[in-house]
Image (cartoon, rainbow, N blue to C red):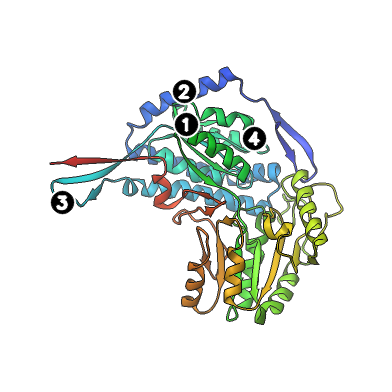
Amino acid sequence: MPIQTINPYNNQLVKSFDALTEKELEQKIAKAHQAYLSWRNESIETRAALLHEVSAIMLRKNKELAKLITLEMGKLIAQSESEIEMCASVYKYYADNAAEFLKDKPLETTDGSAFIRYTPTGIILGVEPWNFPFNQVGRLAAPNIVAGNVMMVKHASNVPQCAAMIETIFRDAGAPEGIYTNLFLPGEKIAALAADDRITGMSLTGSEKAGSSLAEAAGKNLKKSVLELGGSDAFIILDDADIDLAVAKAVLGRFNNMGQSCTSSKRIIAVASVAEEFLEKFTSKISGLKVGDPMDPTTKIGPMVSEEAAQKITRQVNDTVKDGARIVVGGKRIDREGAFYEFTILTDIPKGSVAYKEELFGPVASFYKVKDIEEAISLANDTGFGLGGSVFSKDTDKAIEVASRIDTGMVFINQNVASRPDLPFGGTKRSGYGRELSPLGIEEFVNKKVIRLP
């Protein structure tokens, strides 16, 4: 896949980058390994100071960085600015809390004493996606760098300017060479890197296919891996829900970032007694919104990430309708230049159809009406994915009970799923394994070494 910026607003090529040669790649790995041998001995305070500076730079350059996001993947400019703020908060969170997270943990023993000491392991290779080009990297880089590891990142090939900028930010923050390294590489080169003994862990956020490939390579070479893959999150509305709140959160949860989020509220499941009211209000909220340039702060519907993505969601919707589904609103490309697709709601979706079984990674909501809680839970779990989910009810105990029966890594009550630095992020089933963020995120690629005393 070419490494180039193509502006999805007009599908025009902006800039191209050359992939690394084998010699250049080896030089970068060698520098990263040498950097690790020194960095692992630095104090946590020194490492945290670097993250604080990275965070500060990102906040100072918020508008500049946000424009790069919008240029390369089409995110509305206000959402791009919010992404930079979120990413800066992740770096600050780990800078502020790493010393506490990594302090020795005493163990209870029958005789003598023992404790766990958290020690770094080496180079961590990250394979990162385009949909949150700064924040996804920050979630992996921040905890690992402050823990004493070093990062090498193969970013998505369609956001190369964002990828290069992250390395620049680390350099400007005073990071020694090799602490953070951007790799301009095609995806097929990644599996081979698992065989390199200097690389001790691998993490990927992306598709099932890419995750399976990385996991296979990591397993073959006995490397730890973390995967955050697709999702088809259920958004359950019970009969006692605050409907206006549910509508507002569904609009945000499904259509933020043009629906191109793993934790987007893709399947909206409403109990029959409130289904029609919700659907009417939900449809009204997404109708008549301004379509246009994502750089314009007044635009509400921007392009998808690429022409390929817009064509894929078009095929998925068309195939689902052929299977018997009904379009409530939207359902087609917007007649203008660029990778645009209408905000869409599908309903009467047959079991086994494309929208029922596949992830819809775009601005399309699947709406289901069910007779009761039991049917809602059954439908929510009738998927191979298990990333996130939401439950709306004024009865907190009932909502928690429903949440406990949904097979996912995360469930939010009376809100859409969202990423926060202090909450573990990750899924189950085909949505992957391992966790990012929170104290759990810093523990994935460190050695939990037991030290025993008499």
Mark closer to the chain start, 4 or 1: 4
Which residue corresponds to mark 4?
160
Amino acid on which the number 1 mark rests in the picture: Asn
The Cα–Cα distance between marks 2 and 1, rounded to whole angstroms, is: 22 Å
Q: Are marks 4 and 1 in contact (CB under 8 Å)?
A: no
Q: Which mark is residue 31?
A: 2
Sequence-wise, the earlier of marks 2 and 1 is 2
Instruction: Work out whether residue 229 can be spotted.
Output: yes
* Residue at image point 86% right, 51% down: 336
Residue 110: mark in rendering = 3
x, y (%) of residue 325? 78, 65
Which badge, 3 or 4, comes first in the chain's sequence?
3
- The quarter of the picture where residue 33 lies is top left
The one of 335 and 268 positioned closer to us in this rendering: 268
Q: Quadrant of the N terminus?
A: top right
- Circle 3 residues within 10 Å: few <14, some 14–19, many ≥20: few
Could you give the CA–CA distance between mark 4 and mark 1, rounded to whole angstroms? 29 Å
Q: Are marks 2 and 3 in contact (CB under 8 Å)?
A: no
Q: N-terminal of the two: label 3 or label 1?
A: 3
Question: Which quarter of the figure is the C terminus placed in?
Answer: top left
Q: Name the secondary structure under disc 2.
A: helix
